[in-house]
Image: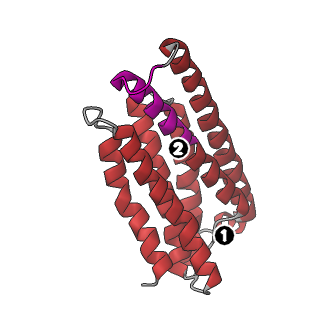
Amino acid sequence: MNLPNKLTLMRIILVPFYIFFLLMPGIPHHYLISLIIFGVASYTDHLDGKIARKYNMITDFGKFADPLADKIMILAALACFVQLGLTNAVVLIVIVSREFCVTAIRLVAASKGKVVAANNWGKAKTISQIVAVLVVMIMQYILELNKLGAITLSDTAKMTELFSVIGETLIWISAILTLISGVIYIIQNFEFIKNAK
Protein backbone atom coordinates (compact mmCIF):
# COMPACT_ATOMS: atom_id res chain seq x y z
CA MET A 1 0.00 0.00 0.00
CA ASN A 2 1.48 3.34 -1.02
CA LEU A 3 1.73 6.50 1.12
CA PRO A 4 -1.36 8.31 -0.26
CA ASN A 5 -3.52 5.27 0.48
CA LYS A 6 -2.06 5.02 3.99
CA LEU A 7 -2.98 8.69 4.56
CA THR A 8 -6.50 7.96 3.34
CA LEU A 9 -6.82 5.09 5.82
CA MET A 10 -5.41 7.30 8.58
CA ARG A 11 -8.20 9.80 7.88
CA ILE A 12 -10.77 7.07 8.52
CA ILE A 13 -8.96 5.89 11.67
CA LEU A 14 -9.00 9.43 13.12
CA VAL A 15 -12.81 9.69 12.89
CA PRO A 16 -13.65 7.74 16.11
CA PHE A 17 -11.20 9.89 18.08
CA TYR A 18 -12.76 13.04 16.65
CA ILE A 19 -16.25 11.81 17.58
CA PHE A 20 -15.18 10.81 21.10
CA PHE A 21 -13.77 14.22 22.01
CA LEU A 22 -16.50 16.21 20.26
CA LEU A 23 -19.23 14.40 22.20
CA MET A 24 -17.47 14.57 25.58
CA PRO A 25 -18.33 18.02 26.98
CA GLY A 26 -16.99 16.97 30.38
CA ILE A 27 -13.44 17.09 29.01
CA PRO A 28 -12.06 20.65 29.12
CA HIS A 29 -11.16 22.03 25.68
CA HIS A 30 -12.91 19.09 24.00
CA TYR A 31 -13.82 21.30 21.03
CA LEU A 32 -10.17 22.23 20.57
CA ILE A 33 -9.03 18.60 20.70
CA SER A 34 -11.68 17.48 18.20
CA LEU A 35 -10.88 20.54 16.04
CA ILE A 36 -7.20 19.56 15.89
CA ILE A 37 -8.03 15.95 15.05
CA PHE A 38 -10.49 16.99 12.35
CA GLY A 39 -7.97 19.52 11.00
CA VAL A 40 -5.26 16.84 10.75
CA ALA A 41 -7.70 14.45 9.06
CA SER A 42 -8.74 17.18 6.61
CA TYR A 43 -5.13 17.97 5.79
CA THR A 44 -4.47 14.32 4.91
CA ASP A 45 -7.21 14.72 2.28
CA HIS A 46 -5.15 17.47 0.64
CA LEU A 47 -1.85 15.70 1.18
CA ASP A 48 -2.74 12.26 -0.16
CA GLY A 49 -4.02 13.68 -3.44
CA LYS A 50 -1.03 15.96 -3.83
CA ILE A 51 1.46 13.14 -3.26
CA ALA A 52 -0.45 10.74 -5.51
CA ARG A 53 -0.46 13.22 -8.41
CA LYS A 54 3.12 14.42 -7.95
CA TYR A 55 4.69 10.96 -7.76
CA ASN A 56 2.24 9.19 -10.09
CA MET A 57 0.88 7.02 -7.28
CA ILE A 58 -2.78 7.22 -8.31
CA THR A 59 -4.48 3.85 -7.80
CA ASP A 60 -8.00 2.49 -8.28
CA PHE A 61 -8.13 1.92 -4.52
CA GLY A 62 -7.27 5.57 -3.93
CA LYS A 63 -9.90 6.79 -6.39
CA PHE A 64 -12.54 4.83 -4.47
CA ALA A 65 -11.25 5.07 -0.88
CA ASP A 66 -10.36 8.79 -0.88
CA PRO A 67 -13.92 10.07 -1.49
CA LEU A 68 -15.23 7.36 0.87
CA ALA A 69 -12.93 8.61 3.64
CA ASP A 70 -14.21 12.16 3.00
CA LYS A 71 -17.80 10.97 3.33
CA ILE A 72 -17.11 9.15 6.60
CA MET A 73 -15.28 12.16 8.03
CA ILE A 74 -17.94 14.74 7.07
CA LEU A 75 -20.99 12.63 7.88
CA ALA A 76 -19.55 11.77 11.31
CA ALA A 77 -19.04 15.48 11.99
CA LEU A 78 -22.55 16.44 10.90
CA ALA A 79 -24.14 13.58 12.85
CA CYS A 80 -22.36 14.86 15.97
CA PHE A 81 -23.52 18.40 15.20
CA VAL A 82 -27.12 17.18 14.99
CA GLN A 83 -26.75 15.44 18.36
CA LEU A 84 -25.24 18.60 19.87
CA GLY A 85 -28.01 20.76 18.40
CA LEU A 86 -25.59 22.67 16.18
CA THR A 87 -27.37 21.90 12.92
CA ASN A 88 -30.61 20.56 11.48
CA ALA A 89 -31.12 16.88 10.68
CA VAL A 90 -32.43 17.90 7.23
CA VAL A 91 -28.89 18.93 6.24
CA LEU A 92 -27.58 15.52 7.23
CA ILE A 93 -30.36 13.76 5.30
CA VAL A 94 -29.66 15.80 2.14
CA ILE A 95 -25.94 15.05 2.29
CA VAL A 96 -26.39 11.35 3.15
CA SER A 97 -28.86 10.95 0.27
CA ARG A 98 -26.43 12.50 -2.20
CA GLU A 99 -23.60 10.32 -0.98
CA PHE A 100 -25.70 7.14 -1.31
CA CYS A 101 -26.62 8.06 -4.88
CA VAL A 102 -23.02 8.79 -5.87
CA THR A 103 -21.73 5.64 -4.16
CA ALA A 104 -24.38 3.56 -5.97
CA ILE A 105 -23.20 4.94 -9.33
CA ARG A 106 -19.59 4.17 -8.40
CA LEU A 107 -20.51 0.60 -7.49
CA VAL A 108 -22.37 0.08 -10.77
CA ALA A 109 -19.39 1.52 -12.67
CA ALA A 110 -17.00 -0.72 -10.70
CA SER A 111 -19.08 -3.78 -11.61
CA LYS A 112 -18.40 -2.87 -15.25
CA GLY A 113 -14.69 -2.54 -14.58
CA LYS A 114 -14.66 1.26 -14.56
CA VAL A 115 -13.57 3.59 -11.79
CA VAL A 116 -15.37 6.93 -11.54
CA ALA A 117 -13.17 9.53 -9.87
CA ALA A 118 -14.39 12.64 -8.06
CA ASN A 119 -15.05 15.70 -10.24
CA ASN A 120 -14.35 19.37 -9.48
CA TRP A 121 -17.86 19.91 -8.09
CA GLY A 122 -17.29 17.03 -5.70
CA LYS A 123 -14.04 18.59 -4.57
CA ALA A 124 -15.75 21.99 -4.11
CA LYS A 125 -18.49 20.48 -1.95
CA THR A 126 -15.89 18.65 0.17
CA ILE A 127 -13.95 21.88 0.74
CA SER A 128 -17.16 23.75 1.66
CA GLN A 129 -18.10 20.99 4.11
CA ILE A 130 -14.66 20.97 5.73
CA VAL A 131 -14.66 24.77 6.06
CA ALA A 132 -18.17 24.73 7.58
CA VAL A 133 -17.23 22.05 10.14
CA LEU A 134 -13.98 23.80 11.10
CA VAL A 135 -15.65 27.22 11.51
CA VAL A 136 -18.47 25.76 13.62
CA MET A 137 -15.96 24.07 15.93
CA ILE A 138 -13.84 27.21 16.23
CA MET A 139 -16.91 29.22 17.22
CA GLN A 140 -18.00 26.56 19.70
CA TYR A 141 -14.52 26.56 21.21
CA ILE A 142 -14.72 30.35 21.68
CA LEU A 143 -18.01 29.83 23.56
CA GLU A 144 -16.38 27.02 25.57
CA LEU A 145 -13.48 29.31 26.52
CA ASN A 146 -16.03 31.90 27.66
CA LYS A 147 -17.80 29.26 29.77
CA LEU A 148 -14.49 28.17 31.30
CA GLY A 149 -13.68 31.79 32.15
CA ALA A 150 -10.57 31.86 29.96
CA ILE A 151 -12.07 34.75 27.94
CA THR A 152 -14.98 37.11 28.51
CA LEU A 153 -17.48 37.83 25.77
CA SER A 154 -19.28 41.17 26.06
CA ASP A 155 -22.68 39.62 25.31
CA THR A 156 -22.67 35.82 25.42
CA ALA A 157 -26.28 35.47 24.28
CA LYS A 158 -25.75 37.64 21.19
CA MET A 159 -22.48 35.93 20.31
CA THR A 160 -24.10 32.51 20.68
CA GLU A 161 -26.92 33.59 18.37
CA LEU A 162 -24.48 35.11 15.85
CA PHE A 163 -22.30 31.99 15.84
CA SER A 164 -25.41 29.86 15.34
CA VAL A 165 -26.47 31.90 12.29
CA ILE A 166 -22.97 31.83 10.78
CA GLY A 167 -22.64 28.09 11.38
CA GLU A 168 -26.05 27.23 9.96
CA THR A 169 -25.41 29.44 6.91
CA LEU A 170 -22.09 27.77 6.14
CA ILE A 171 -23.54 24.29 6.65
CA TRP A 172 -26.52 25.05 4.38
CA ILE A 173 -24.18 26.46 1.70
CA SER A 174 -22.21 23.21 1.83
CA ALA A 175 -25.47 21.21 1.67
CA ILE A 176 -26.59 23.13 -1.43
CA LEU A 177 -23.20 22.59 -3.09
CA THR A 178 -23.46 18.92 -2.15
CA LEU A 179 -26.87 18.70 -3.83
CA ILE A 180 -25.66 20.51 -6.97
CA SER A 181 -22.56 18.32 -7.22
CA GLY A 182 -24.74 15.21 -6.84
CA VAL A 183 -27.06 16.25 -9.66
CA ILE A 184 -24.08 17.02 -11.92
CA TYR A 185 -22.47 13.71 -10.96
CA ILE A 186 -25.66 11.81 -11.91
CA ILE A 187 -25.93 13.65 -15.25
CA GLN A 188 -22.27 13.03 -16.10
CA ASN A 189 -22.52 9.33 -15.27
CA PHE A 190 -26.09 8.66 -16.39
CA GLU A 191 -24.87 5.96 -18.78
CA PHE A 192 -24.21 3.68 -15.80
CA ILE A 193 -27.76 4.19 -14.50
CA LYS A 194 -29.35 3.81 -17.94
CA ASN A 195 -27.45 0.62 -18.73
CA ALA A 196 -27.68 -0.94 -15.26
CA LYS A 197 -29.04 -4.48 -15.21
Assign a secondary structure to mark 1: loop
Q: Residues within 10 Å of mark 2 (few under 14, many from 20)?
A: many
Q: Depth check: give the residue in front, 105 or 117.
A: 117
Q: Nearer the viewer, mark 2 or mark 1?
A: 2
- What x and y, as percent, mark residue 105? 59, 64
Q: Main secondary structure of the magenta part?
A: helix
Q: Which residue is painted at 59% across and 46% down in the image? A: 131
Q: Which residues are magenta?
A: 132-152
What amino acid is at disc 2? Leu
Answer yes or no: is residue 197 visible: no
Which picture quadrant has residue 104? Answer: bottom right
Say which mark, if any, is on residue 134.
Answer: 2
Lateral position of residue 176 relative to residue 7, left or right: right
Residue 17 falls within the magenta-colored stretch: no
Q: Residue furthest left?
A: 26
What amino acid is at disc 1? Asn
Q: Is residue 19 above or below residue 147?
A: below
Position of the N terminus, as image quadrant, is bottom left
Q: Which residue is painted at 40% across and 29% down in the image? A: 145
- What x and y, as percent, mark residue 163? 56, 25
- What x and y, as percent, mark residue 32? 40, 42
Lateral position of residue 49 relative to residue 120, left or right: left
Q: Depth check: give the residue in front, 114 or 153.
A: 153
Q: Is residue 86 above or below residue 73?
A: above
Lateral position of residue 96 relative to residue 27, left or right: right
Earlier along the polypeptide chain: callout 2 or callout 1? 2
Name the residue tied to disc 1.
195
